[in-house]
Amino acid sequence: MLSVLSYGRLVARAVIGGLSQTDSRDYSLVTASCGFGKDFRKGILKKGMCYGDDACFIARHRSADVLGVADGVGGWRDYGVDPSQFSGTLMKTCERLVKEGRFVPSNPVGVLTTSYYELLQNKVPLLGSSTACIVVLDRQSHRLHTANLGDSGFLVVRGGEVVHRSDEQQHYFNTPFQLSIAPPGALRGGVGSSFDVQLGDIILTATDGLFDNMPDYMILQELKKLKNTNYESIQQTARSIAEQAHVLAYDPNYMSPFAQFACDNGLNVRGGKPDDITVLLSIVAEYTD
């Protein structure tokens, strides 16, 4: 039987051993983007980082890497409002807040909230609404913090399997939660999550134009082509994923995830879902200046 003193020494060694194995390196995200607007202008950004009515941003601060996507609601076009104005301005505001250091890495919902209320106080009236997803990597803690509103979202892939994903938020079929500016302005919903990541983890953040047209197994097949962490390889894979989703979106005979969901809700639908597509593809890597 171990004495109290011997047991204490064993515990101390275990604790010290565990601490010595802690990864003290800073992590970062190597991220590439690609997308397509419904107007078929392949991979062309409209104003800033916008594909059609989608928008996105990639920003770095000394403590964190932050990225986001937003999908402007096309129905506003019926009222003479450009849907991309809201999503684009929202993402640009989020990017500015990050670059100015006006955020807390563990609170990405706060980034969305602050950006939203800045839009409400805009001197030039801005109407519209959008879904939104924000992803923040805290470099030192190696934790990923996320905020998601609506049906844009993210996947975290490790060892060829999805280990984390966002929860889609919809009022009912094809009606996602969204940030909206229309008298009176409203900020509703928003789900956050936090978890540890590892070097080599793949993070795919995208609007519903991707997830409505490509099931997980197809996305994972494309990600297998990603062999290293250099930007060129990530960019090539991001483009491959976006291109395949774009092609499937216009295939009338393809049973897309969107069509399957529609059938589950009693609708006789087949084919892809033509939509704007935005893909941000990231790999967790060791931070270098």
Image (tube, grey):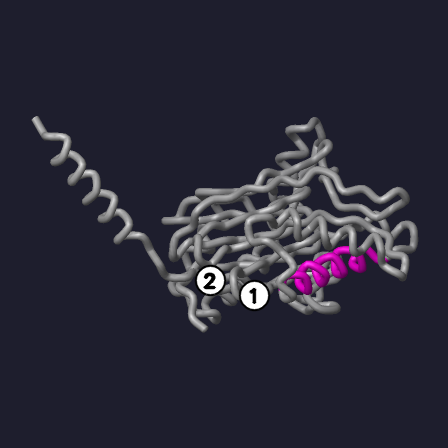
Q: Which residue is more in the foreground, 245 or 96? A: 96
Residue 21 to residue 60: above or below: above
Give SS at disc 1.
strand
On the image, the x and y values in percent for residue 123 come to 89, 61
Q: Which residue is mark 2?
A: 28
Q: Which residues are magenta?
A: 82-98
Residue 63 to residue 131: above or below: below
Return the residue found at the far front: 5
Compute the Cα span from label 1 to label 2.
Answer: 9 Å
On the image, the x and y values in percent for residue 17 come to 22, 48
Task: Identify residue type, mark 2.
Answer: Ser
On the image, the x and y values in percent for residue 149 come to 67, 43
Judge whether residue 250 is colored magenta.
no
On the image, the x and y values in percent for residue 27 come to 43, 60
SS assignment for the magenta stretch, majority:
helix
Q: Which residue is more in the foreground, 132 or 227? A: 132
Residue 102, can we see it?
Answer: yes
